[in-house]
Image (spheres, grey):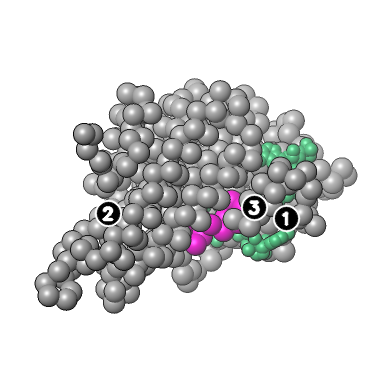
Amino acid sequence: KTAFQWEDPLASRNLLTEEELAIAETAERYCQERLLPRVLQAYRDEHYDAKMLEEMGELGLLGANIQGHGCAGVSSVAGGLITRAVERVDSGYRSGMSVQSSLVMGGIDEFGTEEQKQKFLPDMARGKLLGAFGLTEPNHGSDPGSMESVARPHPNKTGYYSLSGAKTWITNSPIADVLLVWAKLQDTGKIRGFLVERKDCPPGTLETPAIKDKNGLRASITGMIQMDGCPVPEANMFPDVEGLRGPFSCLNNARYGISLGVVGALEDCIARARTYALERKQFKGNPLAKYQLVQKKLADAATDAAYGTLAAIQVGRLKDEGRAAPEMISMVKRQNCDAALRNARVLQEVFGGNAVSDEYAIGRHVANLFVTQTYEGQSDIHSLILGRAITGIQAFV
Ligand code: TGC
Ligand code: FAD
């Protein structure tokens, strides 16, 4: 009889290549040895140590799906195994990395000129140049098509645009060197992507204040982007892509990464709840793990993690073959984020009062997983994307 492995119930390892297994092992070792020891204090202090992006860069973990320009060029599944390893420690650490790798480097790789690629990608791959992705605005989150940020020809500088507007809830914005900002061209009203370099912005034209006192994702840094006539050279605009296809194409990669990332957070919750349930005794010296209600909680969570992994691997394979519809990514992003949050909340119960102590980590995962269900398209928005694809009728407006 084949032995059941509770950590990989449906043997997803069998679907991975030797290279993917090696990448996963490197990422898991780094995350457990170097990131895990930092996260509790970082979360308490609401501190993001950007040095970790340099460490990830040294291991080739940044922009790993990109071919060339100092990037590793690995499969989508391998990229997902990296996010899973990072998010096993903390969703905020994965967030900082996703923005760098998928949203900014991925955008430059897909839509940038060769000059833009050469200028930004190698330093970003090494974690020496930090990126942020500005789409959400104070009045337009789920509906970025209504954005108000605008790019006009600069009144005094030939060959420059002048950007004005505000973006909010932007991961990495307070520390980013290059901010990929989406704004509408004044004359056409079309959305375009601009690479805003902090070092070139005169005082008062670009501010990136941090948003403090978050009750989730505290180990990542989040802020605003406030632009007031910020000069950006025409050479820093993506040349061809217009409309929401630009930002949404970047989001396809990041949403895919989240779909495997949140499985890592859920697997950490399962492992911690299992250990706790085996050690904690109640009623005549029995471990909590002996009780059927506790076992069901573990069985439900392990099942959802295993199904979520298989579905994400399938979508990753199709993505690399150019056969993944964006709705498939919506499906795995929505399903895995919802399942991770739902199961983490239930597993929290296994810890009783100790769940309230941050030493047990489960409360941190629950707070973080609420954010993963919210950003990159809140789950109900993905329901509507799927509903539109199923019925042919859009229900957003
Ligand atoms: P819609 O009419 O659906 O589409 C407009 C244009 O965009 C194209 N498109 C896509 N292209 C590529 N991939 C996709 N997934 C695409 N989805 C749409 C579409 O073909 C069309 O192109 P064209 O050429 O015909 O113009 O646009 P809509 O305005 O009706 O959109 C509705 C909706 C709800 C689907 C969309 O607005 C949406 O997804 N809203 C959610 C917003 C969101 O995800 N924001 C994310 C902000 S970034 C973030 O959260 C980063 S957190 C990072 C971290 O810390 O980890
Ligand atoms: P709203 O759009 O106001 O939605 C509120 C609620 O209403 C949601 O539940 C939504 O599903 C629901 N809703 C909205 N419209 C409809 C509808 N038509 N039908 C049914 N229900 C609807 N953005 C970036 O651009 N870059 C980043 O790096 C980034 N990082 C983030 C980091 C953190 C910590 C957080 C919290 C957010 C981040 N975001 C980022 C923003 C994130 O993408 C948005 O919060 C998200 O898209 C939702 O937008 P909103 O908050 O404005 O909510």
> Mark 2: which amino acid?
Ala
Q: Is mark 1 within 8 Å of ligand 1?
A: yes
- Disc 3: which residue: 383
Q: Residue at x 32, y 57 (%)?
A: 298
Tell whether label 2 touches label 3 (CB within 8 Å): no
* Labels 3, 1: front one: 3
Q: Which mark is residue 65?
A: none
Report the magenta residues as a range. 368-378
The stretch drawn in magenta includes residue 376: yes
Which of discs 1 and 2 lies nearer the camera? The answer is 2
Residue 122 located left or right of residue 39: right
Judge the density around disc 1: few (<14), some (14-19), many (≥20) Cα neighbours within 10 Å.
some
The residue at the point 74 percent across, 30 percent down is 240
- Check disc 1 and give the amino acid type: Asp
The percent coordinates of residue 267 (x first, y second) are: 34, 51
Q: Which residue is mark 1?
A: 143
Disc 1 and disc 2 in contact, CB within 8 angstroms? no
Residue 271's tag is 2
